[in-house]
Image (cartoon, grey):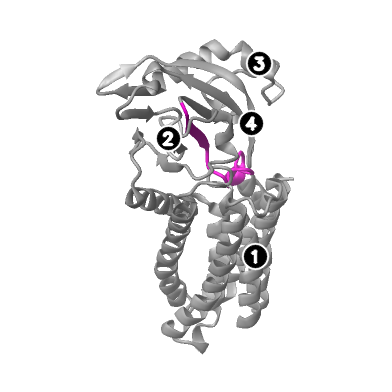
Amino acid sequence: MTRLLLLVLSLWFSGQANAHKASDSFIYVHADQIRVDIALQDMQRLLNFDFNRDQSLSWGELRAGESQFRSLLRSNISLASRGVDCPILFRLEGLSQHSDGKYAVWILDAACLHEKGPIAFSYSLLFELDPLHRALLAVNIGSKQHLQRVASAYDDDKVQLSVLSPGDNRVVLGEVSALDTAFKFAWEGVVHLLIGYDHLMFLLALLLPASRRHGQSTLQSAFSDVAWVVTMFTLAHSVTLVCASLGWITLPSQPVEIGIALSISVAAVLVLFDVNRRAQRRLAMAVGLLHGLGFAGVLAGMLSTSPMKLLALGSFNLGIELAQLGLVLLVLPLLHWLGASLFYQRWLLPLTALGLALSGVFMAWQRL
């Protein structure tokens, strides 16, 4: 039985040990150039550059496959001025580091970037291969400083922030809309929570005790108990989400991801021991601080100094909370109904908690 469970866990989490942060590219438009940072692992997914098969890409391998990948970029990235396509020159500039590893830096030059008037930017790289892939865009409007400063300082320049996705892969550079920014980042917060299986598992572990106490409380009081726990979690991860996204807190991603995985195990073990509500709230707050660092991996670097940072951060956090609240409203009535079953109390609840605990340990081991 133990071997079978370990096999299932291995198959379920295989290749997903570092999948908490979804696939992202980062696009910076500054002065008269565009910089696109593409994860090396994503480049490898698109084209096999690992010639020596050591499971990593070296600078030499990137240069060897540069022309081949340049053709792929040319067919998936485009600029248009007044409805006319602009020829783009692509060159591999170097490497950069983001929260989930190394990225290749590509510089895009086009004559239309020097002209006045609206310029449309389109991006479709990786969308067919991975519908969850996103391109985060920051446009520094009006500055004449060099492109390389865009990742470290925006000063007081006006900045446009956007997210490109399979259903919305085109943006007009320079068109700043607070409403559009808020909507896009709120939606990405929803998506990020729904694809973050480790956060979903932790949330489930927080909800399970409400079903254990079925005979001691009504559904209404169960909602009240859960609301307190989830609120503690929300407040805590909101603090670290903001601090980490703005660059005030910097921690390596690996220990954060390991800690998030182990938090699932801790919450699940407490379900088995049926700890009191106060201990649950304290746990939710403590672990929420850690989970906020995980959420921030999506935005760190992109928003560190952007004047639109507060709107984008607030909208992203709101999206996370809306998704979390929706899941609580869906799952809690079901758990409360199941709590009336003797089979659920004796078998299904303990096995679910045990499965969550083992899953957390297994994910932590994979992330070492």
The residue under label 2 is 142
Secondary element at tag 1: helix
Distance of label 3 from label 1 (alpha carbons): 41 Å
Q: Along the horizontal axis of the image, is 104 left or right of 179? A: right
Distance of label 4 from label 2 (alpha carbons): 25 Å
Q: Counting residues from the N terminus, which is met first, the one under dot 4 or under dot 2?
A: 4
Q: Along the horizontal axis of the image, is 324 left or right of 60? A: left
Q: Counting residues from the N terminus, which is met first, the one under dot 4 or under dot 1?
A: 4
Question: Above or below — where is 125 with respect to 252?
Answer: above
Secondary element at tag 2: loop
Quadrant (top left, top right, bottom left, bottom right) of the N terminus: bottom right
Asked if labels 2 and 1 touch by Cβ distance under 8 angstroms, the answer is: no
Q: Residue at x 49, y 33 (%)?
A: 27
The three-letter code of the residue at mark 1 reads Val
Q: How crowded is mark 2: few (under 14 residues within 10 Å), some or many (20 or more)?
A: few
The residue under label 3 is 61
Asked if labels 1 and 4 touch by Cβ distance under 8 angstroms, the answer is: no
Give x and y (percent) for residue 23: 52, 38
Q: Counting residues from the N terminus, which is met first, the one under dot 1 or under dot 2?
A: 2
* Marks 4, 2: nearer the viewer: 2
The residue under label 4 is 96
Q: Residue at x 47, y 81 (%)?
A: 224
Give x and y (percent) for residue 252: 71, 47
Quarter holding residue 367 = top right
The residue range painted magenta reads: 11-31
The three-letter code of the residue at mark 4 reads Ser
Question: Above or below — where is 129 with respect to 13?
Answer: above
| Residue 145 at least partly seen | yes
The three-letter code of the residue at mark 2 reads Gly
Distance of label 2 from label 3 (alpha carbons): 37 Å
- The answer to which of 120 and 48 lies nearer the viewer is 120
